[in-house]
Image (spheres, helix red, strand yellow):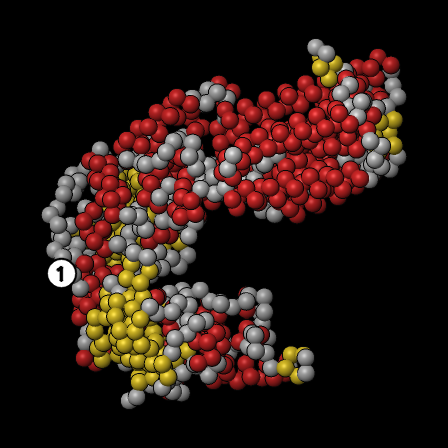
Amino acid sequence: MNQQQFWKIWERFGLFIVIIIGIIGLSLSSPNFATLTNFKNFINQAAVVAIAGAGMTLAITSGGFDLSVGSVFALAACFGAKTLIESPVLQSIAVSLAIGTGIGLLNGLIITKLKVPTFIVTLAMMTIVRGAALIYTKGRDINIITEPAREAAYKFFGGGYIFSLPVPMVLMIAVFVVVYVILNHTAFGRHICAVGSNEQAAIYSGLNVDRVKIAVFAIVGLTTAIAAVIQTSQLMGVNSGTSGLGFELQVIAVVVLGGTSLKGGKARLFGTMAGAILVAIANNGLNLHNTPIFYQYLVFGIILLLAVSMDGLKNKFYTPAWAWAQRV
Amino acid sequence: MDSILQLTAVTKVFPGVKALDSVSFDVAEGEVHSLVGENGAGKSTLIKILGGVFAADSGKIIFGNKQINFRSTHQSQLSGISVIFQEFNLLPDLSVAENIYIGREPKKGPFIDWRKITADSEAILKQLGVEIDPKTIVEGLSVAEKQMVEIAKALSFKAKLIIMDEPTAALSEREAEKLFEIVRTLKLQGAAILFVSHRLKEVFAVSDRITVLRDGRFIATKDVRQTDEEEIIRFMVGRDIKSSFAKNSGHSQAITLSVRNLNFQNSLKNISFDVRRGQILGVAGLMGCGKTQLAEALYGLLPIECGEITLDGRQTKINSPRKAIEMGIGFVSEERKENGVFPGLSVLHNLTITIIGKLSGRLGIRLNFQKERDTLTSYTNRLDIRYHRPQQEIDFLSGGNQQKVLLARALASDCKLLILCEPTRGIDVGAKAEIHSLMNELAKKGVAIIMISSDLPEVISMSDRCITMYRGRITGYLSKEQMTETNIVACAVGQKIIGSEN
């Protein structure tokens, strides 16, 4: 295999190969890895990040990103949990999703209509929404204690099974199918790529750039809220101060790990899912080997750096000669 | 008089173009020497060589009494040449004084000597007769004032030769008048000035001698007292090309677009003209004359202040490209990279982006991929676009093929009026001919075409009718018979006014 072939294969399957190597390695080194309970553990963890990652993939493809998802995650969880104590399950979920989507819409509106840079808007929203969550809960934990039937019904979203598949996994697949259809089978998806590739040209081509961006941020908010419902259902409680802390960076990192270009225009949707699974496997492996949880940060950062470096190397060695001729 | 600058057989070749071909002339001490020529005549290249941006390939340049061959802009400045480019090199957040002395601030120990820097700047500005407080932040200054700061900076280097590249392009007439006064002051103080401009009136008002370049070659140096505008225009154009025989000029056809009294800031003033079905209307003019703004205004990219636009007999307001496309206006920008191509996206997606919204089924999902492919195939055949496969990224196509994709994108949304800005700039001869024949074919089918071009032979051979612009106004409405290079250039430099639109 020469270098060209190597990078070509790496570009397509690199992440999947690494995941398979990880699974084989952990199966051999730890007897508890290849068990059903453990599989459920890490797939649940992966699903939460991957679902928000699906929305973030769209945002990054459109040339933006959203730093407020961690705080939105917390606020959607807090409102959902509090609502659940008093009201039916569906109402609680509706509240969570509405909050996520609403804040996403607001992000999009401020970015497009007031022409404030994405970085500033979502950074400000990150602290505003976190503050709102803390005020709303007065900084206290919310433990979901309510009618047993309702509790059981809510637990289904984080811990139930559909055809013996964990519900978070089913939800993850559903979200990815929907986002895949949006990206590849709708005009909206094409418009997202166009805006991310060259916003000026998108305007000249008569696209409604503002509407595309607003919709994308609304979707990021919605997927974040779905992730928040799943985790709240797993924990049956929420802490407004720590819930979703650092989640935005995890989600952005997973998207980048999956191969979506930060320059915009090109999505690698299933790469995002693979990235989330890889990170979950790594964390799971560390847990199984009784490594202190602090090491997860370290390993996560190293994986990210390695992945991005591989990409840099690929671009250096695997650029067709005729591509260079154009870049003068 | 002794010459301060002497060029002998200076040549510069870029891949595929001989930008300067053995150019020789001289600039005398204390003279204002103008350099004129059409776009692409080699003026910019020459300035950049003198400013130390490029090195000449061959030839001899003597400045002062020394032969020079600058390796950097810094060397050029130190030796006493200052170039004031059209885009200023000022740092907007710093004060006027800091900008004048940037990189060589007078110091007191390790600290900047603020008192001296301010006093020195003040002295220079006074010498120019300009009233600007050296402590003002540059960002707040007008274009004219920024230019004065650039000139002050040149003086602070004790420049013996000041080169001004199109200094009046962005100035109002009053500001330009002020600039000429300063030029005369500088001359009295002993500096030589090389004044580069398209505008012959100014050139004649300010200079002692004029040098004409054409296609990278030296044509003539003339004393202003021994020549006139007519002669200089003849030198600039050179070729004695008779306009080719008239095609179907479409005079009997219905009017597609009618524009009356269109205004936008300083760049469009009382623009009125008609384009008919099947007519190709050429728009000529020099850089900064407003022809690009005209195209952008018609495509909804500029907020027009007043004026009427009537499309197919109905008065309309076009306030966005989306609206323009809906109304049947297609547009190809002159900035292919900035405003046209979607890098990283495939040829297919690049071509169909404007019509993709119409290719989706119920609920907006299920794009009609078959129809999308058919669209691509039909334009590929019609325009002879060359690529490996539809999924290939557009980045890897040649400039000519990218341009064809953009043209196809504009056509795909079924336009009745097509606005093309510099449709063949920077593409090879073959693609150029294909684009021209496509334009003729479209015109035959009844599409009205507005072609904005700096390429005079292109304007003359393609247009059925042509308008010329000068400083935001239309100065010429030329019929096929009147379309000679001499007439177009005369109108484009504001020397002549021909015709009108009723």
Q: Residue furthest top?
A: A163
Decide: is B383 above or below A326: above
Mark 1: few/some/many CA within 10 Å (<14, 14-19, 20+): few
Residue at image location 51% in from the left, 68% down from the top:
B90
**Placement of A156 over or under A186, stated as above or below:** above
Q: Which element is circle 1 on? A: loop
Q: In the rendered view of the protein, which quadrant contains the N terminus of chain B?
A: bottom left
Residue drawn at x 79%, y 15% as measured from the top left: A153
Quarter location, residue B191: bottom left
**Looking at the picture, which amino acid does disc 1 mark?**
Asp
How far across and how far down the image is residue B247, in percent?
A: 14, 43
Q: Provide residue B450's location: percent of width, then percent of height.
A: 28, 45
Nearer to us in this view, B434 or A301: A301
Q: Residue at x 17, y 51 (%)?
A: B479
* Residue A136 occupies quadrant: top right
Residue toward you, B237 or A272: A272
- Position of residue B117 measured from the top left corner of the image (x, y, whole percent): 59, 81
Residue at horizontal 50%, vertical 37%? A2
Position in image of residue A47 (x %, y %): 70, 26
Q: Name the residue under label 1.
A: B240
